[in-house]
Image (cartoon, rainbow, N blue to C red):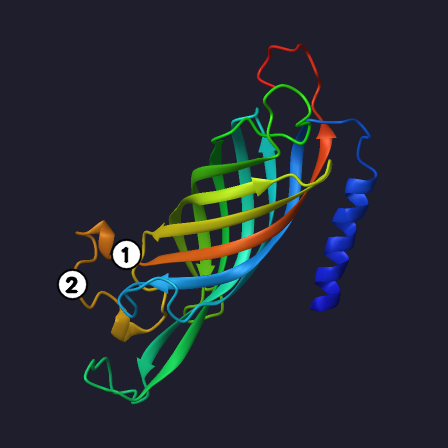
Amino acid sequence: MRIRRLSILLGLSALAAVASAGNGPYLLELGLQGGTMYYMGDAQRYIFTHPREVYGAQIRYKINRRWALQAKGQNGRIAFKYPVDGAGFKPKYTEQQILTNNILSLDVAAEYNFFRYGNDWGTGNIRPYTPYIFLGLGVSLYDGLERYGNVALYIPFGIGFKWNFAEHCGLILTWQHSMYFVDDLENVDDYNNIERLNGSNFLNCDRTGCFMFGLVFDFIEAKKVCRTCDW
């Protein structure tokens, strides 16, 4: 697994090396991300409780200095406590074990940069860093009777920070929260709809979140038309 990840990283580095030698701005961005993932639902009420690993890749199309579209795929796990006794959900139990479930996700989101952002920060009021917010739509495969046997839609939203520390390279830091349209991400029947609110209260659906750090590479230089356009 480590060799595979290293190969992907080296491939992205080679892509950045053969990209245009201009000074930007660039239209597309590829990147790798990794971090920690948590779950909130019937089995767990608080964020960052029993976090597990998550990793993925992204591609971002920069519409202009303020707006961008991002497609992201990631794989991770959620974790939560469950009674050791298999007789059913009994909150009075004190002896518990930690269960996990796998989630594979793909989402598309629109991003808004608070600053006019770019790697050609020597011109105008362009900055090599910016906080940003995003909102989108995604779909997940998660374990059911079979591995990744269930499907669910979700709404991803959150905040992040971008920093172009070199012409073709940048760093991103993201906190994403995802609202799901299902209430069984745990894949444990005892935790499915214990409040009897399925279909009547959207806020009772499961939620996940992730805190991720990533490295991105810019390529395909945008055509420069004039000094007063969006770029």
Q: Residue at x 39, y 51 (%)?
A: 177
Residue 88 versus residue 128: which sits nearer the camera? 128
Residue at 60% across / 33% down in the picture?
A: 61
The front one of 198 and 26 is 26
In this view, the mark in front (2 or 1): 1
Above/below status of 180 relative to 88: above
Instruction: Name the residue at 17% across, 58% down.
Output: 197
Image coordinates of residue 173 in percent, x first then y, are 53, 49
Label 1: how many Cα within 10 Å (few below 14, some 14–19, many 20+) = many
Rendered position, 230 above or below 90: above
Q: Quadrant of the C terminus?
A: top right
Amino acid at the residue labelled 1: Cys
Type of amino acid under label 2? Arg
Which label sits on residue 205? 1
Closer to us: 78 or 128: 128
In the picture of the structure, the residue carrying the numbered disc 2 is: 196
